Amino acid sequence: MATVEHPQKTAWWNNAHNRALLFQILLAIGVSVFFAFIANNTIHNLEQRGISTGFAFLKQKAGFGILQHLIPYTENDTYGRTFIVGLLNTILVSVLGIICATIIGFIVGVARLSSNWLVSKLAGIYIETFRNLPLLLQIFFWYFAVLQALPSPRNSLHIGEKFFLNIRGVYLPNPIFEQGFGWVEGAFILAVLATIILKRWASKRQEQTGEQFPVLWTATGLILILPTIAYFATGGPISWEYPVLKGFNFQGGITIIPELAALLIALSVYTASLIAEIVRSGILSVSHGQTEAAEALGLRPGKTLRLVIIPQAMRVIIPQMTSQYLNLVKNSSLATAIGYPDLVAVFAGTTLNQTGQAIEVIAMTMAVYLTISLIISYFMNWYNARSQLRER
Amino acid sequence: MLVHTPHPNLPPPSTSVGVIGWARKNLFSTPFNSALTLCALYIVVRFLPPVINWAFLDANWAGSTRDACTDGGACWVFVKVRLTQFMFGFYPADQYWRVILAFGLLGVLIAWLLLEKTPKKSWVAAFTILIYPIIAFILFYGGLGLPVVETNRWGGLMLTLILATIGMFFALPFGIILAMGRRSTMPIPRALSVVFIELWRGVPLITVLFMSSVMLPLFMPEDLRIDKLVRALIGISLFQSAYMAEVIRGGLQALPKGQSEAADALGLSYWQAMFLIILPQALKTVIPGIVNTFIELFKDTTLVLIIGLMDLLSIVQSAFSDPKWLGFSVEGYVFAGLVYWIFCFSMSRYSQHLEKKLHTGHKR
């Protein structure tokens, strides 16, 4: 048996494993000392200023009004409720912004790739203008320069005495659902269910026989026609409440406050310019060989786009798009600069100033955004894993 | 003998060359395209002339009070009168040369580093990183015989540039360390880096600025007063380094594993391998990403307005409330927008140029 020559034993401090351990212990100690230092200072400073810690302030009476609230709110409600009101306002502007930005962004992104020179150049100008300007400047521009220059309520811009636009905001008719509207909703749900079943049946049939079924058109027809029939069968169970000028302002209808309008326009326009670039680069990222292969197989241009290009482009587009959505949610916090009552303006602004509970309030605000981010990035990772290229 | 003499070639049909041919091909190729072109033309004709009229033809350029603005167009007099304030904030007028000198020097240094084929790049880089910050601090703040200018008098474009440059200056090394930590095999540095990066990337910059302006004084010993500008800079640097870390991590991940294995085989230590083999290659591939992050940072500096610093946007915004110049907000925003736009657009063009230069694959 050959004897194994043991290498000369290295000193323990030259052992890579020991070094890593030592370094990690030192790092852990350093970080702990740093946090202990901060915690110690904070406790001392809070005692000096006579600020009590804890979340008891959430149950106290707030005593200030909020410009826009989606749930009932009065000055007599608690600070805890201001948190909910602010959070709902943030979610409202984020959801509306994401929808608008996606629609505008897709249109502009496709227009940028158009073979039409003029359209492509206009889209290019749009993209280069808006993505190179700070968002805050755009919000200020829409709020102070455009919306503040609108006429007074008496001289409102209007479309047929139903839609009004003035310095106080946008006024829209408010739909009132009367008895029997449940039938329309029921018809809509029925149509959606039918579409799902149809889709399953169609793909099964295609796998077995190779015959295709025009699911898209049938589904569109179903979803449009069934509720319409229900609407007329029940005698049109929607009536509209129109805004009316009373005294100095409008009463009734749905009001969009100018702060929301300015923030929404700025967020959508800015994010759309970034989404347009993502859409463009996504479509360009699909190699030209794919189009040629699809043509060689005899697919028509429309089908090439729908079955070959878009599914592959989506793989590039979706992750970047998700991070733009995340940015939009985070950017909606700029609302505080023009006074739209979002989470940061209401809770980290007014509530913080009134209670002085800086640590709790900022921690809660950050936790909300962090939670939203983590949920969205979890969803994104899930989608990414599902839609990734499966190489054989 | 019968000789075949071919007819001279006919010119191409007039509808397929020249302006008409170009228009047919690019504007009116299909009925749908023609309709689109007409819509786009309508938009251009409807909006372009009024804008040109407002901004140039009917605009007022001469004069020094609002009475000079009589032509109905833009009142650039407002911007002209306020220009030094928009650029330097409330910096003393007789000290402007210090700011100009500091930025001029920085411009020369950066151009030296970015241009190709300039000699002694490494010495210039060392000077920029080690000595220039000291010179800039003395020029901006004072000392060595120069009168001290407190930071609350700094403002305008100067402050915007200072915030962006210093933010970048700290974010880059922090970002490299964090990216290395996230790629490390040791659990504690990796966990700390992941938590740090995800925490700052998950929250809006505004809450970070609120935190640094409201909570930082609570975190520090009682007698330590931190300047408002420094507090904002700490917030911006922490926030930015998280984003920078993710960009650099992309570069580290894109590097083939063979590089670090080769370094190991040569017997290089971790730090040698990092600084001699891995980072130079990884950083080079992510320069466009770093420039894009810098553009984002440049646009994000406007948020310091909310914690009361007087950057370019903030000072333009406050100029509207001057009773002598009420109602010129559009001119102010257009001017501020133009300044931001020129900076961001030229940087994004530079980053695209780099991307093209670094792209060595096959392109169609």
Image (cartoon, coloured by chain):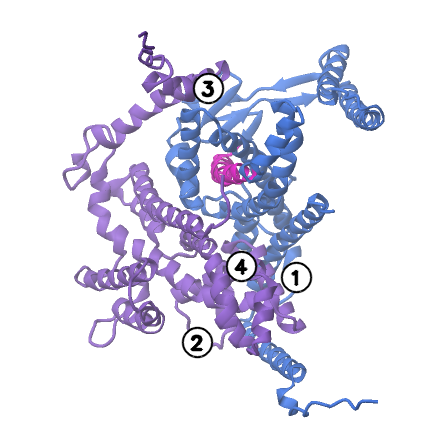
Chain colours: A blue, B purple
Q: Are marks 3 and 1 on the same chain?
A: no
Circle nearer the viewer, 1 or 4: 4
Q: Do the residues labelled 1 and 2 touch (CB within 8 Å)?
A: no
Q: Name the residue under label 3.
A: B36
Q: Is residue A267 magenta?
A: yes
Q: Do the residues labelled 3 and 1 touch (CB within 8 Å)?
A: no
Q: Mark 1 points at which residue?
A: A55
Q: Mark 4 points at which residue?
A: B251
Nearest the eye: A157 or A137: A137
- Kindly identify the residue that appears in the image at 43 percent across and 48 percent down: B356
Majority secondary structure of the magenta segment? helix
Q: Mark 2 points at which residue?
A: B224
Circle nearer the viewer, 1 or 2: 2
**Which residue occupies the extreme front position in the image?**
B1
Q: Where is residue A129 in the image (x, y as percent from the top left)?
A: 39, 38
Q: In this picture, which residue range is highlighted in magenta?
A: A256-282
Q: Where is residue B44 in the image (x, y as percent from the top left)?
A: 36, 23
Regarding residue B178, the answer to whether it shows in the image is: yes
Q: Where is residue B212 in the image (x, y as percent from the top left)?
A: 49, 64
SS under mark 4: helix
Q: Which mark is residue A313?
A: none
**Which residue occupies the extreme top position in the image?**
B2
Among the 4 quarters of the image, the one containing residue A186: top right
Badge 4 density bin: few <14, some 14–19, many ≥20, Cα 10 Å: many
- Measured Cα–Cα span from mark 2 to mark 3: 64 Å
